[in-house]
Amino acid sequence: MAFMKYVFGALGFENDGKKSKPKKEKPKKATYNFKNGKNERVEHIDGIPVYYPASFDQSKDYGQFLRDKKAVIISIEACTKDDSERILDYYQGVVYGMSGKFITLDEGRLYLLLPQGLEVEE
């Protein structure tokens, strides 16, 4: 009986007037858990590289990724308070100057920098 349903289905006939239910796709889960309390350093979150600048001087190097039209996630948890403020101000200026987007993922820890033309699905 299952074979005949397969044959009729392949030929385009409906199976006894019953509509098959579309399969629900499971939403993709983020590869980083903000609430796990661990200080694990990951290299990528959902395919976007994560950088951990230790100082303001080191953070200047990562601005090139935005100029190359690539999204970047910046983690400032390893910085001092003064350096983290300077880094955030610097990246906000770079993103603004390039008509991009500066998105806070986790206050005080992770920030997503998007160049112009890239969007984020929520």
Image (tube, rainbow, N blue to C red):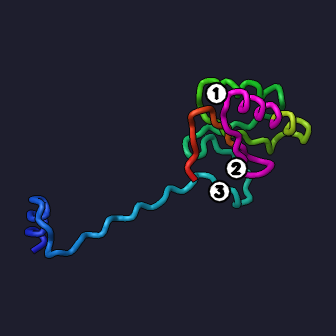
| Image position of 88 with respect to 36: above or below | above
Please provide percent x and percent y for residue 40: 70, 49
Compute the Cα span from label 1 to label 2.
Answer: 19 Å
On screen, residue 27 versus residue 68, left or right, reads left
Q: Residues within 10 Å of mark 2 (few under 14, many from 20)?
A: some
Q: Which residues are magenta?
A: 88-111
Q: Nearer the viewer, residue 121 or 81?
A: 121
On screen, residue 5 versus residue 39, left or right, reads left
Quarter of the image for residue 60 reads top right
Residue on which the image places disc 2: 105
| Image position of 27 with respect to 81: above or below | below
Q: Residues within 10 Å of mark 1 (few under 14, many from 20)?
A: some
Which of the labelled discs sits on residue 65, or is there none? 1
Please provide percent x and percent y for residue 106: 73, 52
Residue on which the image places disc 3: 33
Residue at image coords 34%, 64%: 23
Q: Secondary structure at mark 3?
A: loop
Q: Nearer the viewer, residue 47 or 115?
A: 115
Residue kind at label 1, given as amino acid type: Phe
Quarter of the image for residue 38 reads bottom right
Please provide percent x and percent y for residue 117: 57, 34
Residue 96 highlighted magenta (yes or no)? yes
Residue at image coords 41%, 60%: 25
Q: Nearer the viewer, mark 3 or mark 2?
A: 2
Which of the labelled discs sits on residue 23, or is there none? none
On screen, residue 62 versus residue 4, left or right, reads right
Q: Are marks 3 and 1 in contact (CB under 8 Å)?
A: no
Residue 2 highlighted magenta (yes or no)? no
For marks 3 and 2 on the same chain, the one whose residue lies earlier in the sequence = 3
Q: Are marks 1 and 2 in contact (CB under 8 Å)?
A: no
